[in-house]
Image (spheres, coloured by chain):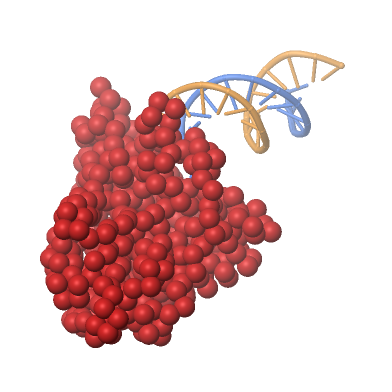
Chain colours: A red, B blue, C orange
Amino acid sequence: MAETNINPVIIWLRRDLRLADNPALHVAAQSGKPLILIYIDEANKGRELGGAAEVWLHHSLSALTASIEEKGGQLILRRGKAADILDDIIDETGADEVHWNRRYEGWARDIDEAIKTDLKSRGLKVESHKANLLTEPWEVETKTGGFYKVFTPFWRAAKASFTVATDLPAPETLDCAEAKLASDDLADWTLLPRSPDWGSKMMQAHTPGEAAAMSRLKSFLDGPVEDYAVQRDRPDDETGTSKLSPHLAFGEISPRQIWNAAKDNDYTSDKFLTEIGWREFSYTLLFYNPDLASQNYKPAFDNFPWDSDAKKVEAWRRGQTGYPFVDAGMRELWQTGWQHNRVRMVCASFLIKHLLTDWRVGEAWYWDTLLEADPASNAASWQWVAGSGADASPYFRIFNPFTQGEKFDPNGDYVRKYVPELAKLPKKYIHQPWTAPGLTLLEAGIKLGETYPHPVVDHKTARERALAGYKASRE
DNA sequence: TGAAATGTTGGGGCG
DNA sequence: ACGCCCCAACATTTC
């Protein structure tokens, strides 16, 4: 840098931890200037990452560092207020240009906008890029100029409005500033839990990083997507869904890469791409409703008579509700940092409706335990189940926790995997152990109330209570 | 991207 | 042969 006398360009990486199809990086690399790639652990985040997501972040940064170094570059890690850190880097290097990819949380937009205004006023070139959505929230509008509040018309309009360009290639080489810049040691950020080390167990089922994301997409499109419309509802089928959510949430893969890879697939990929649509819709909702994770989208829910029991909520968190399908789901979440979509709906419905718990309690738990911790999808989906959201499921749609199990885990394999104390129970009783004859329970080594809990609430009673609460809130 | 209650229909057993 | 009842099976309504 000093020799060529060219001012370097900064690429500020956030939740876009990839080299391919990364517009900010691509444009910066094309400038021919030396590159400064930086990730900042921001001191003034609007919301701290959940524990599981920190584990993912650690491994994702580690993978990204390796692939950047392979191309001759350096990923700089620093901690502090983003504005201060960028100032430091500019002082240290004389960088006169900054690129980043957009993010959509209210607090993040405030930070980005303030930095952009400040740097521009000081004569730097600053550009933000579209990278993490197919459609910017402001690109899809209703005829009356607002944002869509119903998914189906939103997605129809979105698909009609965009032309998806081909993916951007990863830069061949990364010509970073010559002198190595000071960087934190990733280990010092202590993103990984130590005692106990529950993070390693989560990583047995997941591999963070751009390469793993792409290979997961490829193997999913190479077969399972063909049966996606049906198999996506089967938690007992390991390959029924793509499991791309954490990769997407950290930007290891872009929705455009997914779109381009899936749309020309020989199979019908519409159902699969519709899920990308829900993600887009959720980000639009978050953009126009920055408090989506903390405020009812429908204010009518503000006076809902929640009546939750702390002990029962804790039983839900730990997978001890006495409803095997719910418990399997909550244990899958706790152990692996991921949960099957069908199960997410059932577990969320159970917390909100059977336990009459404010959806925000569940939102917070999933934020903390899901590897992905996606600010838009998590908030929008919890509100969807609660009935308080845009285009939400009607409140009175209350899942039956055992018939859902019987429908979507008919042999009980999913339950047996995560609730091993029920493993010997015949499938006839696996979703309703309380209906099993005494001898059958005995033979399966189960003593209800001891080796596995009685249901924490009676389904019929809980359902009626939930409906009564809903009725009361409307009066 | 429900479930339960209620309503309707039609076949079969039976007096 | 007929009416009556029962009750799946399916459809509709309600929450």
Image location (x, y in percent) of residue A302: 21, 34
Front-most of A67 and A455?
Answer: A67
Which image quarter holds the C terminus of chain A?
Answer: top left
Q: Is residue A324 above or below residue A32?
A: above
Q: Quadrant of the N terminus of chain A?
A: bottom left
Residue at x-position 40% and y-position 64%: A27
Quadrant hosting residue A356? top left
Q: Residue at x 30, y 81 (%)?
A: A4
Does residue A14 appear in the picture of this structure?
no
Q: Is residue A215 visible?
A: yes
Looking at the picture, tell me which residue is in the foreground, A393 or B8: A393
Viewer-proximal residue among A94 and A365: A94
Q: Is residue A464 above or below residue A411?
A: above
* x, y percent for residue A311: 20, 55
- Can you tell which quarter of the image residue A327 is in? bottom left
Where is A394 relative to A247, above or below? Answer: above
